[in-house]
Image (cartoon, helix red, strand yellow):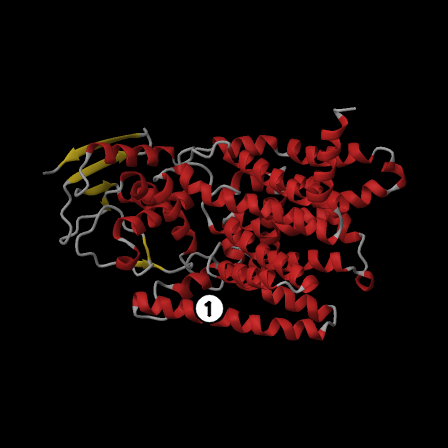
């Protein structure tokens, strides 16, 4: 009998703190899964993000926040009396957080990946909490299992890029909004505003959350909610104008750094960088490929089950929450098809929608008479099927090494040169493709042509065909 008392205590603690304990376990599990292969050099699929933003983050530490005016510098090596050229295509939140991680843990691939790992692990917890809130504990848990089973989360969930961060901050805002609507605690309102601001200061997708919420409020014919959300539209406009003012402060132009040009290019309006023959059919075909590969066909079928089970006039509050997340996740894909056609990881914005709609579908299927006796097996088998379906793709992503040669060249330059050296890379074609990798791994001033203002002290001749290179000291 003495053994029953500890068990009773545990069950009592579990019953009282079930949500908190589960959230902590899910965070730890996600953190552990995402840490697998997290120290790999930046030469895998889309790892140019890691070296690009990692280099900007290192420049924050190198020159200081005040010297850089918080602007993003893509130069490498140390520049005396620098004339800074700023990268303005995104707000600086991601590289600022990477710089914080670098200052705490040193400059490395792992410390760069730590930021998206923390963000994705938090997103996993928030998916669970939202699923539990709008449906039940089982739905929240199933939604997380489906999310964690996808190649999208397991690979791109640790990539130092904006998507994991903005999804995390947007979910902090949205979950806090749902909580505040229910119990009016000021803490949740503060978290809502803070999450919203951080999402909008991370990347442009953060600005799509409030419009998605307004659209759903209009569809629900909830005029009071529309009125409540209007001030936050004003906040979003103020944040956007503040960033434009910041760009002017850095560059002397409100849209300096070709901010308008890059927006038009991503939207497929601008001709430079436009994908040839990009039309609705080719775009939908590419989107289908990204979704089926990174989310899996199994999860797409489950989401389709959820959608087909809905009738507009009978939508519940839970349905409207998922629809809101679907609109939020789709908006970037609609407005910036050129960027999405190129970058498969941009479907990350749909993660909360896909996971929760899939979780709701599994819960619904488990309630059907034909599955009721084997509901546990079904609930475990479907996430496992998601894992198995694209396990080969996940392995290929983890082992990808397309830019390994560029990393090796950059590392060798750093090893065999001095910090004040100016390195000429030849041929220029190699430098154009490998620029970000060479900058991050060499941490030297890199040039690709003779310049009267920059006299190279080192020349590197690269033979990409034979994967060889020669470093010559010109001093």
- The residue located at (52%, 48%) in the rendering is 164
| Residue 207 percent coordinates (x, y) | 53, 64
Q: Quadrant of residue 258?
A: bottom left
Residue extending furthest right?
A: 369
The N terminus - image quarter: top right
Left or right placement of residue 133 versus residue 154 in this view: right
- The residue located at (24%, 40%) in the rendering is 426
Residue under pointer 1 = 240
| Residue 244 percent coordinates (x, y) | 40, 69
Q: Quadrant of residue 138?
A: top right
Residue extending furthest left?
A: 475
| Residue 337 percent coordinates (x, y) | 54, 57
Examine the rendered structure and indicate whether residue 157 appears above or below residue 326: above
Left or right placement of residue 183 versus residue 119 in this view: right
Left or right placement of residue 408 versus residue 311 in this view: left
Q: Quadrant of residue 83?
A: bottom left
Examine the rendered structure and indicate whether residue 124 appears above or below residue 394: below
Q: Is residue 296 visible?
A: no
Examine the rendered structure and indicate whether residue 368 appears above or below residue 399: below
- The residue located at (39%, 51%) in the rendering is 95
């Amino acid at each position: 009998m003495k053994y029953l008392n500890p068990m009773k205590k545990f069950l009592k603690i579990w019953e009282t703190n079930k949500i908190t304990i589960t959230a902590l376990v899910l965070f730890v599990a996600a953190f552990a899964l995402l840490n697998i292969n997290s120290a790999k050099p930046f030469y895998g699929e889309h790892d140019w993000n890691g070296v690009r933003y990692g280099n900007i983050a290192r420049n924050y530490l190198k020159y200081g926040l005040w010297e850089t005016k918080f602007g993003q510098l893509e130069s490498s090596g140390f520049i005396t009396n620098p004339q800074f050229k700023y990268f303005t295509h995104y707000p600086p939140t991601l590289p600022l957080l990477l710089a914080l991680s670098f200052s705490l843990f040193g400059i490395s691939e792992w410390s760069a990946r730590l930021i998206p790992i923390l963000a994705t692990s938090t997103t996993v917890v928030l998916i669970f909490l939202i699923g539990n809130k709008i449906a039940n504990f089982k739905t929240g848990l199933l939604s997380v299992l489906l999310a964690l089973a996808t190649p999208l989360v397991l690979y791109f969930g640790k990539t130092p890029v904006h998507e994991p961060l903005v999804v995390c901050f947007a979910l902090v805002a949205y979950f806090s909004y749902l909580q505040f609507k229910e119990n009016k605690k000021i803490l949740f309102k503060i978290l809502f505003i803070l999450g919203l601001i951080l999402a909008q200061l991370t990347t442009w997708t953060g600005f799509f959350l409030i419009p998605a919420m307004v659209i759903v409020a209009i569809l629900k014919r909830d005029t009071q909610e529309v009125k409540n959300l209007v001030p936050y539209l004003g906040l979003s406009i103020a944040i956007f104008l503040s960033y434009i003012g910041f760009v002017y402060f850095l560059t002397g132009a409100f849209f300096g750094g070709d901010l308008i040009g890059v927006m038009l290019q991503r939207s497929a309006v601008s001709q430079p960088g436009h994908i040839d023959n990009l039309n609705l059919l080719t775009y939908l075909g590419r989107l289908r490929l990204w979704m089926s590969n990174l989310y899996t066909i199994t999860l797409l079928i489950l989401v389709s089950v959820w959608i087909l089970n809905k009738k507009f006039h009978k939508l519940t509050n839970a349905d409207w929450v998922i629809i809101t997340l679907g609109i939020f996740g789709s908006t970037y894909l609609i407005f910036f098809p050129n960027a999405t056609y190129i970058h498969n990881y941009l479907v990350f914005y749909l993660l909360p929608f896909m996971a929760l709609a899939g979780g709701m579908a599994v819960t619904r299927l488990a309630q059907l008479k034909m599955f009721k006796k084997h509901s546990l097996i079904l609930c475990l088998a479907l996430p496992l099927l998601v894992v198995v379906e694209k396990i080969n793709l996940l392995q290929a992503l983890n082992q990808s090494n397309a830019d390994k040669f560029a990393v090796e060249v950059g590392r060798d330059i750093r090893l065999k040169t001095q910090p004040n050296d100016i390195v000429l890379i030849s041929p220029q074609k190699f430098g154009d493709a490998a620029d970000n990798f060479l900058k991050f791994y060499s941490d030297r001033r890199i040039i690709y042509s003779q310049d009267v203002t920059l006299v190279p002290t080192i020349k590197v001749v690269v033979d990409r065909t034979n994967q060889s290179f020669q470093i010559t000291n010109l001093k």
